[in-house]
Amino acid sequence: MILARFLGPRIFILVAVILAAAILVPMANLWLPASHPLHVPSYAVPLFGKYVCYALLALALDLVWGYVGILSLGHGAFFALGGYAMGMYLMRQIGSRGVYGDPVLPDFMVFLNWQELPWYWYGFDQFWFAALMVVLAPGILAFVFGYFAFRSRVTGVYLSIITQAMTYALLLAFFRNDMGFGGNNGLTDFKELLGFSLQADTTRAGLFAASCIALAVAVVIVGWITRSRLGKLMVAVRDAESRTRFIGWRPEHVKLFAFTVSAVMAGIAGALYVPQVGIINPGEFAPVNSIEIVVWAAVGGRGTLIGPVIGALLVNFGKSTFTAIAPEFWLFVLGSLFVFVTLFLPRGIVGTIDHGWNAWRARRGDADREKGEAVDDAPVPAPGPAE
């Protein structure tokens, strides 16, 4: 109840639903027989896990776009960096079980005639080091990029353009075979994680549960940040940056904090995504992926926390459905959805519902006040004759 009072009932319910899914979906997959109507098939567990990772990614974007006003078109880069850090660890775990049987070099390095492991691959045979890189790689990039961008007071569409340029530059770099990240094929053919086979149903269920727990923790952290004094300052920077600077605050510091935290969250989402889908390649850096993240947040409702989570789940479920039925029309559907939301639901699904609910409560309050004033202004009847 303390958590519900601190975060608000809606965020508390969201966290409870996420944690319930972390328990119920693995149970429905592992314990219920295939003939049971509530059984979750094994192929659906990593698919649902992918949706949860996307929801965490959308929440990360909402922190900077919805509350600080930074429209980042490069969050796919942070997601991909976290994914590559986890993929490098998974590649080192293959060992001599690869196609070429080399205990140290991954298969693609043997194929490209690499003679020794690059220095930046050292340490990725340890999970703790890989987990540290999942946080540091996107976090340091966001901090350095944000420091120079915000210090130079780059804002608006110009900031969006350079974030997209950043992810496109990384796309071109990771496509090169001499970078040592697998080139256009990327990293794949993973075998195990922490000694557990990635093909086992129990491992897939565990990864799904871990993704849900990470999302729930992220919702609590972002909820705490946005409801604190720092969160109010973030909104002030979003709505009136010049006035915030005039009264003595440093908006660039607020932006840098939010941007770095958001990048770390995106990197964690990428790290959880890779072992569930089984591959990471430079395509994850594609600018269109970062634009899709914006669509998820816009559809759900930015600045609401719960909205981007719902938007990511709905859009990606629709993507899975449409790409199975008519894959050639999916991009048209996605573009039409974004145009529709922009024109008719500018606040998104959750934002529109909130606006309608608040408007209804305001009208009801006005009606109650008018009724009370009418009662107060009514003439008092004269007393009857004394008996």
Image (cartoon, rainbow, N blue to C red):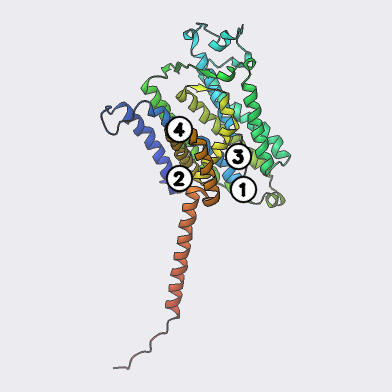
N-term-proximal mark, 2 vs 1? 2
Q: Amino acid at mark 2?
A: Ile
Is residue 273 among what the camera can see? yes
Q: Nearer the viewer, residue 378 or 271?
A: 271
Residue that badge 4 annotates: 323
Front residue of 154/17: it is 154
**Cα distance, mark 3 to mark 2?**
20 Å
Residue that badge 3 annotates: 258
Q: Earlier in the sequence, mark 2 or mark 4?
A: 2
Q: What residue would you read off at disc 1?
A: 233
Q: Earlier in the sequence, mark 3 or mark 4?
A: 3
Classify mark 2: helix, strand or loop. Answer: helix
- Which residue is labeled 2 in the image? 11
**Which residue is more in the foreground, 271 or 41?**
41
Measure the alpha-carbon separation of dots 3 and 4.
34 Å
x then y, percent, for residue 341: 52, 47
Q: Crowding at label 1, few (<14), some or many (≥20) Cα neighbours within 10 Å? A: some
* Disc 2 to disc 1, C-alpha distance: 21 Å
Q: Amino acid at mark 3?
A: Ala
**Compared to 152, does 229 lie above or below?**
below
Q: Is residue 65 above or below residue 239?
A: above
Residue 106: give its label: none
Q: Is residue 110 left or right of residue 31?
A: right
Q: Position of residue 246 (x, y in %)?
A: 72, 51
Of badges 1 and 4, the one in the foreground is 4
Mark 1 and 4 residues: CB-CB less than 8 Å, in contact?
no
Is residue 279 toward the left or the right of residue 174 in the image? left
Mark sitting earlier along the chain (3/2): 2
| Disc 4 secondary structure class | helix
